[in-house]
Amino acid sequence: MNILKINNGKVEIRKDNGSLVRTIGNGDAISADINSDQSLVVITTNKGKVEIRKENGSLVRTIGNNDATNAKWYGSEIAVTTVKGKTELRKENGSLIRTM
């Protein structure tokens, strides 16, 4: 089981014993979450972008409207909190399911 840690805007993937697996991202991360099968990481940047990255760090896609404050996995979907206080539920491909 891996753990995510944000250090100076970079997302560190660490084993549960604390050893570093790899560092991913562009150095502008404010939050990150890993999915249940540990294959994808969702990163929220300080510019309001939400990036989906593979565990190896390669960018899969950027989703949302660049107004995100946080993003978390919710099963196979992503819950994105926006600056307006709304929560957008999005599919892994980025398409909007609903706004709450």
Image (cartoon, rainbow, N blue to C red):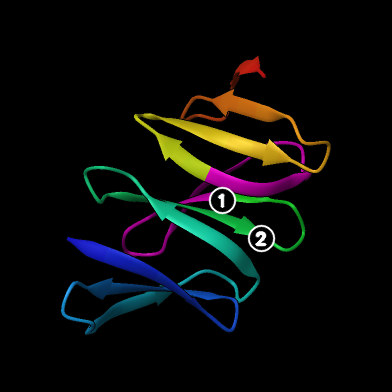
From the top left corner, tell me how far across and down residue 85 is, in percent: 77, 36
Q: Spatial distance from mark 2 to mark 1, Cα to Cα?
A: 8 Å
Start and end of the magenta stretch? 51-71
From the top left corner, tell me how far across and down residue 18 is, in percent: 23, 82
From the top left corner, tell me how far across and down residue 67 is, in percent: 78, 44
Examine the rendered structure and indicate whether residue 49 appears above or below residue 89: below
Task: Identify the residue at horizontal 57%, vertical 25% (top origin).
Answer: 89
What numbered label is drawn on residue 26? none
Examine the rendered structure and indicate whether residue 100 appears above or below residue 65: above
Q: Is residue 25 left or right of residue 14?
A: right
What numbered label is drawn on residue 45? 2
2 and 1 marks in contact (CB < 8 Å):
yes
Task: Identify the residue at horizontal 26%, vertical 42% (top origin).
Answer: 36
Q: Is residue 40 left or right of residue 65?
A: left
Among the 4 quarters of the image, the one containing residue 16: bottom left
Query: Is residue 33 in the magenta section?
Result: no
Query: Is residue 53 in the magenta section?
Result: yes
Task: Identify the residue at horizontal 49%, vertical 58% (top origin).
Answer: 32
| Quadrant where the C terminus is found in the figure | top right
What numbered label is drawn on residue 51? 1
Among the 4 quarters of the image, the one containing residue 2: bottom left
Q: Secondary structure at mark 1?
A: strand
Badge 1 density bin: few <14, some 14–19, many ≥20, Cα 10 Å: many
Badge 2 density bin: few <14, some 14–19, many ≥20, Cα 10 Å: many
Q: Which amino acid does the dot numbered 1 rest on?
A: Glu
Examine the rendered structure and indicate whether residue 54 appears above or below residue 25: above
Q: Which amino acid does the dot numbered 2 rest on?
A: Thr
From the top left corner, tell me how far across and down residue 48 is, in percent: 74, 52
